[in-house]
Image: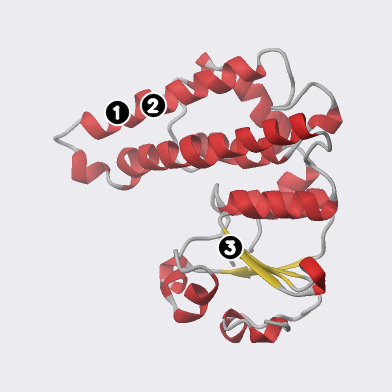
Amino acid sequence: MSRLSDFPITQRWPAKNPDVIQLYSLPTPNGVKVSIALEELGLPYEAHLVAFARDEQMTPEFLSLNPNNKIPAIIDPDGPDNAPIGLFESGAILLYLAEKAGKLIPNDPVGRYETIQWVMFQMGGIGPMFGQFGHFYKFAADKVANNPYPVERYTNESRRLLGVLEGRLRDRKFIMGDEPGDYSIADIAIFPWVRGLSVHYDAAETLRLTDFPCVSAWVERCSDRPASVKGFTVPATA
């Protein structure tokens, strides 16, 4: 594809400015990772709301960009070799944006791969396990009211993962270090999910988040960044 208009998704969500990155998302813990990164990196973008309430993630136009029908997804009209590129999977998008801008990921190979390692920790552990916890604890609580096993299982696994984070953050402000410049896509990948345990799932007491003071301080530190404050509300839902 050589032009933004060649992507079928733009028929349903037309680009007002076809020269900037097009973001297709919803302000969920997974979705805001990319809007926060875009704000941190200062990359111009245009946000389009994919309304799950209307099953827009299942439309042919959205599936043409992400056949896995999940948000977020992007199109960068100025991709490699100056050609448009469409991407899905938030971890892949974070890595692409960081490398495009030359920020939020270390330049040295060891630091780079260590950062990617923690992004994968979120993709393979934090996201799926916290998501399952939230599903059974809040959204499907009525379906498991007589079966405590699902909530117990994912409560225990969520606390185990929080313990891994607590150990990592015990002697540092950010996942990759103690300096302001150490803030990276690893932080951006993980902290919205931890924040979501309270904000989206109302589970701070159940998960005993006070047992993880370093994690709690880190989430507050990351959430207070101006790019995060803005990214939490992108795309606008009203």
Q: Which residue is mark 2?
A: 157
Q: Which residue is mark 1?
A: 153
Q: Under tag 2, what secondary structure? A: helix
The crowd level at tag 1 (other Cα within 10 Å; few <14, some 14-19, many 20+) is: few
> Does the residue at mark 1 contact the one at mark 2 (Cβ under 8 Å)?
yes
Q: Under tag 3, what secondary structure? A: strand
> Does the residue at mark 3 contact the one at mark 1 (Cβ under 8 Å)?
no
Q: Residue at x 69, y 55 (%)?
A: 35
The crowd level at tag 2 (other Cα within 10 Å; few <14, some 14-19, many 20+) is: some
Total label count? 3
The label number, if any, that marks residue 93 in the structure image = none
Q: On the rendered structure, is 21 left or right of 50?
A: right
Which one is in front, 84 or 195?
84
Q: Quadrant of the N terminus?
A: bottom right
Q: On the rendered structure, is 49 left or right of 41?
A: left
Of callouts 3 and 1, the N-terminal one: 3
Q: Residue 50, position in %: x, y? A: 53, 69
Q: Which residue is mark 3?
A: 25
Say whether residue 231 is visible. Answer: no
Give the Cα separation between the discs numbered 1 and 2.
6 Å
